[in-house]
């Protein structure tokens, strides 16, 4: 059993060191030196290897792993960006061969160069990926991500709804997105404890300096507020050493605070050399004995974010401070009317219970539509009707019933189960639109259908079915009775 599994099973505190693979001998040597430590302040230390953090051409986590002179079990990341189901299944086989059995499944951030409307880029969604791997490898340790650092109701609510799906899909462990807002860490922890079967939570953290904050401008979904930046800049103005020492002290405090809060461990990002590691270890050793509870710890954390002559630091963006449980949003009359209209149309045409639906089902399942010309005609017909109505891209397996009539293909990543972690105040990571999942969440709350966002696990689209009509499939698949979405998933796992 891997060190991470053993540690989690024992309810002990675990440290994961994140390694971003680069084809660089020096980096690998540093990683090996750090892996040889095996512990941070006595806590078991293991390694996670990032996937496609920079670009799709990065060294793959498996290649990085096999480059190690003394490989030990690591947590591989799998990013769904520009990938399909077959890529994931192929990775599982390669992991079997390498003796690895733990995986963090991520949708992934925007692929560099992906511009909506140009070459379609597909993202294998984390919920569907979790379902696939859980079915194919029932005993593996599967981790999922959650980004609780959201400050508007719709984007925050949608994050937690999707996390519930990840629990259902088989996640054993959740690792939070990089964040510094300890109240949001507490919020995520409390949410997990309210779940019927809570899973361990780990938090991704790093030593934050002004330089790192500037770098994080390009990382979707990470919140560094203006007041945080002002403090970091003031520290940098004193000296680089001073700023680094303050950042290390805050990181040490964050590790201690998260442990006191009940977190199962930390996922340490941005530690690239042994000196940084040792400085962190020393800082934790120096501080740890001072705190026995969060009440002791909180004033020290607050003081670590203060500088004389500077305004107090806030961790939420100016003007936006939503907390889980606060409910104010309401869909517009137009949004609700559209939903009710589409719902009524769907019932009439696709329920298989009305006369119209039975007639429509009979018509689109005639053998005529199975020949290439007929199939092309039917595809064009569906596309011409549904594209103006819902933005349909004729994916071949319509999911509108499970998405409150918001077509998943109108999300630039094609996500059906909920948002990625990259939204910013309800805006899509791509910056050009409101996140469709925020709009869907607002609608779900307003029409009393929030269960759709948590209960309906939507499988990924089969690539070979794209650009076909979904209508014959809809009536053929359901002719023997409707299949709930979560059981209709992943029909073939014969890898
Ligand atoms: S889910 Fe697929 S078939 Fe349904 S509207 Fe969207 S692209 Fe079209």
Image (cartoon, rainbow, N blue to C red):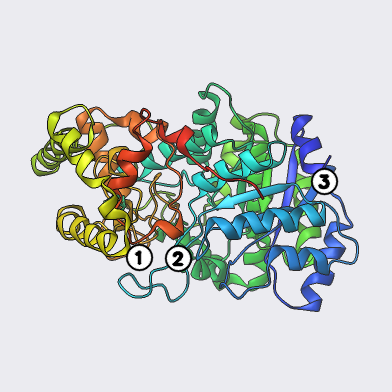
Element class at badge 3:
loop
**Residue at the spot x=45%, y=65% of the render?**
110
The response on whether ligand 1 sits within 8 Å of label 3 is no
Vertical placement of 225 versus 351: above or below?
below
Q: Which mark is in front, 1 or 3?
A: 1
| Left or right: 292 as drawn, with respect to 360 | right
| Left or right: 179 as drawn, with respect to 335 | right
| Residue where numbered disc 2 is placed | 110
Q: Residue furthest front?
A: 367
Q: Earlier in the sequence, mark 2 or mark 3?
A: 3
Q: Earlier in the sequence, mark 1 or mark 3?
A: 3
Report the front residue among 494 and 29: 494
Q: Badge 1: how crowded within 10 Å, few (<14), some, or many (20+)?
A: many
Identify the disc placed on residue 430: 1
Vertical placement of 199 versus 92: above or below?
above
**Residue at the spot x=14%, y=34% of the render?**
348
Distance (Cα) linking label 1 and label 3: 40 Å
Identify the disc placed on residue 41: 3
Report the front residue among 494 and 444: 494
Measuring from the top left, give residue 328's x and y in whole percent: 23, 34
Measuring from the top left, give residue 396's x and y in whole percent: 34, 53
Element class at badge 1:
loop
Distance (Cα) linking label 1 and label 2: 8 Å
Q: Earlier in the sequence, mark 1 or mark 2?
A: 2
């Amino acid at each position: 059993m891997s060190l991470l599994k053993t540690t989690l099973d024992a309810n002990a505190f675990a440290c994961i060191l994140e390694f971003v693979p680069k084809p660089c001998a020096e980096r690998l040597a540093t990683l090996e030196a750090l892996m040889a430590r095996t512990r941070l302040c006595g806590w078991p230390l293991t390694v996670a290897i990032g996937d496609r953090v920079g670009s799709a051409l990065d060294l793959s986590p498996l290649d990085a792993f096999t480059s190690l002179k003394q490989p030990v079990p690591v947590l591989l990341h799998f990013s769904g960006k520009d990938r399909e189901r077959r890529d994931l299944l192929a990775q599982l086989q390669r992991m079997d061969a390498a003796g690895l059995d733990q995986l963090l499944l991520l949708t992934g951030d925007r692929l560099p160069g992906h511009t909506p409307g140009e070459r379609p880029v597909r993202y294998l969604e984390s919920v569907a990926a979790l379902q696939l791997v859980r079915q194919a490898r029932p005993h593996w340790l599967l981790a999922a991500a959650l980004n609780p650092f959201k400050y508007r109701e719709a984007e925050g609510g949608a994050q937690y709804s999707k996390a519930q799906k990840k629990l259902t899909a088989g996640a054993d462990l959740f690792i939070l997105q990089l964040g510094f807002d300890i109240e949001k860490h507490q919020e995520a922890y409390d949410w997990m404890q309210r779940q019927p079967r809570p899973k361990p939570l780990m938090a991704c953290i790093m030593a934050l300096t002004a330089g790192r904050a500037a770098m994080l401008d390009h990382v979707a979904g990470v919140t560094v507020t203006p007041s945080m930046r002002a403090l970091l800049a003031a520290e940098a103005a004193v000296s680089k050493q001073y700023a680094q020492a303050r950042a290390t002290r805050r990181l040490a405090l964050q590790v201690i605070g998260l442990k006191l809060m009940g977190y199962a461990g930390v996922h340490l990002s941005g530690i690239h050399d042994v000196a940084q590691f040792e400085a962190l270890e020393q800082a934790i050793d120096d501080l740890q004995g001072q705190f026995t509870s969060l009440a002791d710890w909180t004033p020290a954390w607050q003081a670590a974010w203060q500088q004389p002559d500077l305004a107090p630091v806030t961790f939420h963006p100016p003007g936006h401070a939503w907390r889980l449980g606060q409910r104010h949003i309401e869909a517009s009359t137009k949004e609700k009317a559209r939903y009710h209209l589409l719902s009524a149309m769907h019932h009439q045409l696709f329920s298989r219970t009305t006369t119209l639906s039975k007639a429509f089902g009979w018509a689109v399942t005639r053998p005529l539509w199975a020949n290439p010309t007929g199939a092309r005609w039917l595809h064009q017909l569906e596309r011409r009707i549904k594209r103006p109505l819902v933005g349909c891209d004729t994916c071949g397996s319509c999911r509108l019933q499970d998405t409150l009539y918001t077509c998943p293909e109108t999300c630039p990543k094609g996500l059906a189960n909920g948002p990625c972690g990259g939204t910013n105040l309800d805006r899509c990571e791509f910056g050009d639109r409101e996140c469709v999942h925020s709009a869907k969440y607002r609608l779900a709350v307003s029409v009393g259908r929030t269960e759709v966002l948590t209960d309906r696990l939507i499988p990924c689209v089969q690539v070979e079915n794209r650009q076909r009509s979904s209508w014959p499939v809809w009536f053929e698949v359901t002719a023997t009775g409707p299949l709930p979405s979560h059981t209709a998933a992943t029909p073939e796992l014969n890898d």
